[in-house]
Structures are given as C-alpha cells and as structure tokens.
Image (tube, rainbow, N blue to C red):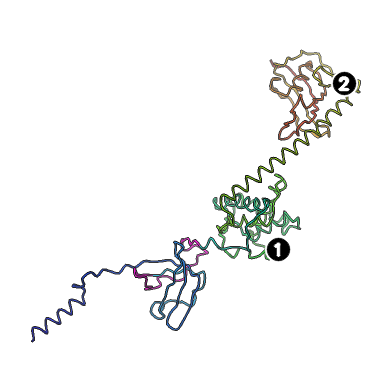
Amino acid sequence: MFKKTILSILLIAVLTTGLFAFGSKEQVVKNVPVYVQSIEKNKKNYIISGEDESGSVNEYTLEKNKNTKSFAFESVKEGSVLILDISDKGNVLNIQDKTIDYKNKSYSVQFPSQKKATIWQIEKPVELKDRFSYAYGFQFFVSNAQQGVTFNAKYLARGILDTVAERENLFAADDFMPILDSYMKGEKTMQSIDETMLPKSLDEVIALTKSENEFDIYSYALGYYFTVYFMVYNGIELDAQRFAEGAITALYDIEHVMTDEEITSSIEEYYNILIARQEEMLKELAAYNLKEAESFLEENKKNADVIITESGLQYIVKEKGSGARPTNESTVNVDYRLTDLTGEVIDENENISFPLSGVVPGFAEAVSLMRVGDKITCYVHPSLGYGEMGTQTIQPNTLLIFDITLNSIEK
C-alpha cells in the first residue's frame, strides 16, 4: 500500500512536469502588428476588428485585466496600431507594445487599407479632359514623390485652383519666391507629410488663409507654378480639381480611381488630340504667313531700289564695298540682323564666321552677290528660308528680312 501511494505521487509529479506529455509541443507566439478599424467593449472583453500586414481583417478578443492590465487600453482608437502577441491557436496573449504613431512612421509596417484613405469624394473621371487632368497630375507628381519631394496637399491644391480660376493669389510673389528658391537649392529640409495636410473638401481648400509656415508657402508656390507652366507655356487645358486630385493621390500614396493602364492611355489619347490640334493650327498659320509674305513682296517690287534675282530673292544695297565676291562654297565673316514683317528681331550677330553651304538658300544667295564691305537688306521668300516647317523660334512660312554686312572672306 505504501509503495503504491509513492508510485502514484511520482507519476503525478512526472506528468505535471511534462516528461510524459506525449505529443505536446511548445506554444509558438507571433508578434502581429494590427491596424485597428473598430473596437467594442463589454464587461469582460475588448473586441478589436483590425487589419494585418497581408490586408486580412480579423477579430481579436482581449480579456480585461488579463491582456490589458498594464496597458492604457482606453487610448486605443480607430486608426491606432497595436502589436499583439498571438499564439499559433489564434489566442491573444498580450499587447506587446503601446499604440504606435503610424503618421510619424515610428513603425514601418505598410497596411494595404491605408492606401484607401481619401481626400474629398473622388469620382472616377469620364470625360477625356477630366481623365487627362487626373492622370497628368498623378504622373507628374508621382515622380516627385519617388524623389522624396513632399508638399502640404491643402496649399498645393489651393495653388493649382488659384491658377486656373484666375483668383487673387493667396500669397504674392514677393512672399514665396525667396522661400521657393531656398527649398529648390536644398537650403531648407522638406517636411514629413501626414493626414492633417489632406483637404477633406474643396470648401476647406478655398477657405484657406495666408499662412506664416514656410512649408505651406512653398507648397502653394509649386502648385501655382506647375499649373502655370502646363497651361500657359505648354498650352494644355486642365481641369484644376482633377489635376489636384491626381497630384494628391500620387503624393500621399492614396489608391487612385483610375488604373495604371487608364492613366497611361488617357495621357496618350489627349496628347494625340493636342498634336493633331497643333498641326492644324500650324497649317492655318503657315497659310496666313505665306499670304502675308507674298503680299509684302509684291508691294516691295514697286520700290525702285529693290533688285530681284531669278530665284525671287529681293535685296537693296545700302553701302557698296570694293572687295572680293564669295562663292556658295566660301566661308565668310559677317554682321547680320534678322527681323520679321512686324520688325521684331529674331536673331543677330556680329563678326561671326560660317560656310555659306550651311545656311538657308536665300541668305547664301544674298551673300554670294555681295563684295567685301557691302551692306544690304534682303527679303527672303519662305521657300528660300525655313519654309512651312519653320523652327522653334520662327513661325512657318515667315518672310525673313536680313540686314547683312560682309566683313571678309576667310576661304
């Protein structure tokens, strides 16, 4: 009886130490960051609905006074981030860390739903101009974001809207030019951005007042100047709200309302229309300029001093020289000034040398008719100049008026 009792006691001791716990294994605990979406409280538990790193949304039950005894759980709200110790059976064992300030990125977890945050209610654009404006804003500013450039979205949007609506600027150029210059030179550090800088409505953007914060001023200035650049210098029609929405979507990594393919195709489609429109405008401008050029030359024939060559070149000798005459293959040194029919100076140079074989036919012919020391004014028909193509600075079918002095023949 005594031996049997001892044996029973030893057996119980062995079983409780786990030496005979067949098939048992150590519990695995994982640290799971959870982005809190909602929280319920009852007498016994806290029930959290939260998203993990994969984007899955699960419910986690934490017993009061067991899991949360030394934790300021009342501070947990929607949008908080917790690190939970979770067993392989799915039980929440502990809250390992307090609420994490995700906005300041003290924890580097990316939660998919955070890209679903939004500003004002963005509707998917339908019309081409709206689609292009959104897509162009996104494409342009996403490259800035990739380079680490940041903006206060509220003031960036206000700068864009002020440009298109032609309202009185929130800041004068004197306010923002020195600040803009210092940021562009890297003398000031870009500010980190958070959701407090996201506008919740267009009314909020319109109601903005002048700020003393230099980052706000910088953001406004860039929104203003980027829009001026696209609309004024490049002649691109933009919808201000859509352009701002695309920009903010890119900068704040918000889920965009157009797919990557739709963004690309919208830009290409609009560009094709712009190119076709530009070609039509250039065709009309070329026809107009040709008519003006030929009308001028016809009237200019009445001038008794005008000499007309077989090619149609017209010129007047202002001063006669007595030097040699170049050929079309010569390299010459000249002074010249080029103007158009309005008298605007397009180009001018003094004491410049070049081979006549490398210039427009009308200029080469005029110089080949000169002697060293001659000064002439010649009128070059577009067909002997830059023709209907023109250049970046010369319109298609522009009549060229050259004042030329032949200084020397170099070879």
Q: Is residue 301 left or right of residue 286?
A: right
Q: Quadrant of residue 301?
A: top right
Mark 2 to mark 1 CA distance (whole Å): 63 Å
Residue ID for mark 2: 306
Q: Does residue 127 belong to the magenta stretch?
A: no
Residue 55: x and y, percent?
A: 46, 63
Q: Quadrant of residue 380?
A: top right
Quarter holding the C terminus is top right
The mark tally for this picture is: 2
Q: Which mark is residue 206?
A: 1
Dots 2 and 1: beta carbons under 8 Å? no
In the rendered structure, which amino acid carries the disc numbered 1?
Answer: Ile
Q: What kind of element bears circle 2?
A: loop
Q: Which residues are magenta?
A: 85-112
At horizontal 79% and vertical 23% (from top left) the residue drawn is 404
The residue nearer to you, when weighing 212 against 147, is: 147
In the rendered structure, which amino acid carries the disc numbered 2?
Answer: Val
Quarter holding the N terminus is bottom left
Residue 235: x and y, percent?
A: 72, 45
Q: What kind of element bears circle 1?
A: helix
